[in-house]
Image (spheres, rainbow, N blue to C red):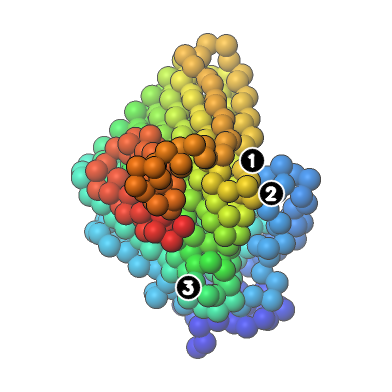
Amino acid sequence: MPSVIENVNNLEEIVQTISMARNEPESVRQMRINALKDLQQYPIPDRVSHVWKYSDPLGFEIGQRNISLTTDKCLQYEGEPDYYHPLDLGEHFQKNLYGKLITPSRLTCINDAFYKGFFIRIPSGTKQKTLRYKFHSQALNAYECVRGLILVEQGSDVNIIGEFTANDADAQCINAVIEIVLENDVSLNYLSLHTQGSQAIQHLYQRTKVGKNSNFTNLIIGLGGKLSKCDLGVKLAETNSATSIHGIVLGDALQRFDHHTRIHHLAPHTKSELDFRVALKDKARSAYTGNLKISHEAIKSDAHQENRNLLLSEDAKAESIPELEILTNDVIRCNHGVTVGRVDKSQIYYLMSRGLTEKEAERLIIEGFLEPTISKIPDENLKKEVEDRINAKLQIL
């Protein structure tokens, strides 16, 4: 069996081949075929939509790319979850959890039809464990669909690290959909690393539901890829649920980053904090859209979002679009802040007068710019992981 199906026009034939190669049950095979039929309901988005204003949706179509079949070499993990399956999401769990947080779209239908899936279950009461999974795209000109479902059961306190990588010279497209469910009294620190090769493009659609008295800390680190588009949504669904989203993007050359965050307060006494920092040089581009919604029922909510952008060259550009929808007057706080600015040349000259090279001075300024976000990472091991990845990127800037 080849590792990819090359440029087959009949998509249903591809679905059948994938399902047979993985010995999937008929119910899963039919789910894939239904997704393919549903795809016809969703045309390719136009650039008028603000969601696609800064990225060309045609770049995420299958087109003439190859559909990859391999899974075991692409998905790797470290740690000991109660349940982990690298090939499918399990029929029982599909019926109860799979797809419940997803708003169907063209890309999610493609993902449903061709996904390589994994399901991770953290059992109740798990404490101080770290689990790592890694998806590595290695097929030339491949279209990779990744589907993940993560369930953290009541009373657990864990770290999860997920990384997306790709070979540097290969032009892959990664279509990833991740669902995360936190039950009550859970603390989850989730580090999402994006270190794809220079020719890879990625679309990540991630949705999280946070239970009562639970806290979801999401760390988004964007370092690699030709184009990385991430659509991240969090529902604070129960009383005293909370989320903190900390994003760091370092871009150079012709890299493009397009991030959307959507935080929805649905219950009383919920709290959200968002801190997204972007540093760009050369002709790199970044667009950030932060949507914050507080429902009528979400009284006494506390919400703050902040996006700061540092431009290290004349050709680097950043856009920031805050969107606030507040449907109740009874809130503790709901505000946002945005800055886009170029590096102060006088700072560079001052540091160089103290013996630093221009590159060393620039690096010191970037480190100082990112430090407020890094300092908010609650786990020391995760903090070190982030610092190491950022330092590796700074070495080549």
Q: Is residue 309 left or right of residue 217?
A: right
Vertical arrangement, residue 237 with respect to residue 69, above or below: above
Q: Which amino acid does label 3 sit on?
A: Asn
- Front one among 31 and 328: 328
Residue drawn at 72 percent across, 62 percent down: 58
Whole-Å distance between the Cαs marked 2 and 3? 25 Å
Q: Name the residue under label 2.
A: 54
Question: Mark 3 or mark 1, which has the lower sequence index?
Answer: 3
Tell which residue pokes out farthest to the front in this image.
353
Tell which residue pokes out farthest to the bottom in this image.
1
Q: Name the residue under label 1.
A: 319
Q: Could you classify mark 3 by the number of other residues whose Cα lies within 10 Å: few (under 14), some (14-19), or many (20 or more)?
A: some
Residue 309: give x, y in percent of width and height.
54, 39
Vertical arrangement, residue 297 with respect to residue 192, above or below: above
- What secondary structure is marked by label 3? loop
Q: Is residue 301 left or right of residue 86?
A: right
Q: What residue type is labelled 1?
A: Glu
Quadrant in the picture for residue 370:
top left
Kindly indicate whether the residue at mark 2 contacts the one at mark 1 (C-beta within 8 angstroms).
yes
- What secondary structure is marked by label 1? strand
| Count of marks, rendered view | 3
Whole-Å distance between the Cαs marked 1 and 2? 9 Å
Q: Could you classify mark 1 by the number of other residues whose Cα lies within 10 Å: few (under 14), some (14-19), or many (20 or more)?
A: some
Residue 206: give x, y in percent of width and height.
51, 48
Kindly indicate whether the residue at mark 1 contacts the one at mark 3 (C-beta within 8 angstroms).
no
Q: Mark 3 points at which residue?
A: 167
Residue drawn at 67 percent across, 81 percent down: 7
Question: Mark 1 or mark 2, which has the lower sequence index?
Answer: 2
